[in-house]
Image (tube, grey):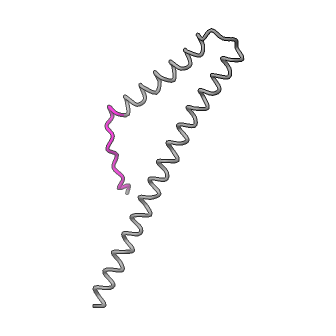
Amino acid sequence: MNNYMSSNTSSFYAMSWISFVVSFGGGLLGIWFMEADMATKGFFAMTFLFAVSSCFTLAKAVRDKHEENQIISKVEKAKTEKLLTEFKEIS
């Protein structure tokens, strides 16, 4: 059973996806209509796509680290509770 409860609403997810699509589309349209040669547009397009993929990778890494810390914290808490219970039994 997953005890992790999301505090985000469906409106938050919708707003996140809408803002991503609008900003991504705006960036690509800006590059497409930019008055520059194809080599410059290609460079900006590759840089833009790399930045977007890097943002996704960073967000996933931060989320994974946060979830790992939560699991470690739960294990440490359980060990501490077990030791305290054993200590009370001995006393």
Res 80 quadrant in image: bottom left
Residue under the image location 63 percent in, 27 percent down = 47
Q: Is residue 10 magenta?
A: yes
Our reading of the magenta stretch's main secondary structure is: loop
Query: What is the total number of numbered labels drawn onto the structure image?
Result: 0
Residue ID at (36%, 69%): 77
> What quarter of the picture does the C terminus occupy?
bottom left
Residue 87 image point, x, y percent:
32, 85
Q: Is the residue 87 above or below the residue 11 in the image?
A: below
In the image: residue 4, left or right of residue 64 = left
Which quadrant is the N terminus positioned in? Answer: bottom left
| Residue shown at 33% from the left, 40% from the top | 8
Depth order, front residue of 41/72? 41
**Residue 65 left/right relative to 10:** right
**Residue lying furthest bottom in this view?**
91
Residue at the outermost right position: 39
Query: With respect to residue 41, does 77 lie above or below?
Result: below
Is residue 91 rendered to the left or right of residue 47?
left
The segment highlighted magenta reads 2-12
Check if residue 42 falls in the magenta segment.
no
Depth order, front residue of 69/40: 40
